[in-house]
Image (cartoon, rainbow, N blue to C red):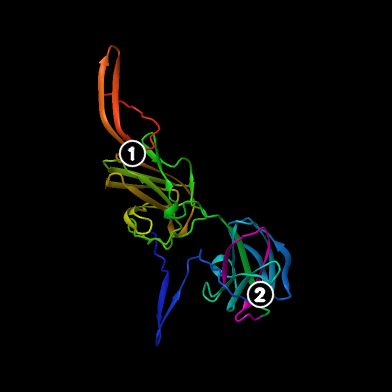
Amino acid sequence: MKKITPIFRVLLVSFVVISFAFPSDAQECRTGGCSISATQFPTSTQSTTSSTFVTVSTVIFAGEWQRYSVTSGNSYEWSLCSADGGSASYDSQLTLYQDNGTTLLCYSDDNCGDDAKIGWTATFTGFVRTQVNQYDCATNSTFTTLVWRQTAVAPSNDNCTGASNLTPTAGVFTNPGSQNSAGATSSGVAIPACSGFTSSSALDVWYKFTTDPTGGDATVTVVGGTGFDPTVQCLSGSCASPTSISCVDLTSGGGTEVLTLTGLSASTTYFLRVYGWAGGTGTFTINVAGTALPLELGSFKGAVEQNCNRLQWETITEKNVQWHIVERSQD
């Protein structure tokens, strides 16, 4: 069974101290930092396209700096956090500079416990430097492990305002092909309890569809790709203040989630939010089928003519309809 991961804890001493345990995807880019030193280690320039953390070195001393190749538009993370594979047995600091060693770009201190983690999106193609320090900008000769990675670019539907429009094709709202939430960030919308479970974080992507002039029912189907455990939520209202209608999370990685919606209002836009359990991301497919499709039928007539049936119908309203498909039953 899935377990709820607490995001904070309260410690009572003679007064109240609140310490936050950030999820593993959290990082920061603060102002400030420590001045560049004269010592580079390791001396080689680092380069990576890996979305998982790779080791810069396991024997860095506080006060030493490192050099990296970066590409404009790509996002990068550097971490001393043990959850990411980093290690610092002291109160660590991390500063990011341009390659000139004087222009400060980012700074981190006490991001995960008393250790540092920087997240930064490159605004140029070239080189940058990080420097490890012990608080307060001190040096030491203690072995320190620094890791880094290139993070995926956030998808265009990373938040509600950029929700992808699901258009009807052959009677079904669909966004053709496989979807991918890799690189998604948290939209900040409250995480509900779905099917009795609640996730520790939600790196979500968003979709929307508009019902027909009569409203009705709809069924949302999301099929997770290998290893991706999807949660599906339907919301109404505005992106500024969305209201949760229903959500589902019954299966595990690679499973199919089916969300049944009833009594949808006429000519109304609804939002669908898809995210993985416990901050997971991955591929999936999504479609919405049901009676609340954007077509209002005015009349439908049928008559037998010799060896065939003659069918005639008229629609009153249509929205984004590409074609009509007529089906028959054997009885």
Asked if 252 appears above or below 84 in the picture, the reply is above
Question: Which quadrant holds residue 288?
Answer: top left
Asked if 121 appears above or below 286 in the picture, the reply is below
Q: Can residue 117 be found in the magenta stretch? A: yes
Residue 298: x and y in percent read 26, 31
Lower position in the chain sequence, tag 1 or tag 2 = 2
Q: Secondary structure at mark 2?
A: loop
Q: Nearer the viewer, residue 116 or 89?
A: 116
Q: Secondary structure at mark 1?
A: loop
Numbered range of the magenta stretch: 116-138
Residue 274: x and y in percent read 42, 52
- Residue at left offset 63%, top offset 80%: 137
Q: Amino acid at mark 2?
A: Phe
Crowding near pointer 2: few (<14 within 10 Å), some, many (20+)?
some
Q: Nearer the viewer, residue 228 or 49?
A: 49
Q: Amino acid at mark 1?
A: Pro
For mark 1, what is the residue?
294
Inspect this view and state whether residue 103 appears: yes
For mark 2, what is the residue?
143
Q: Marks 1 and 2: CB-CB under 8 Å?
A: no
Crowding near pointer 1: few (<14 within 10 Å), some, many (20+)?
many
Asked if 136 appears above or below 326 in the picture, the reply is below
Inspect this view and state whether residue 329 appears: no
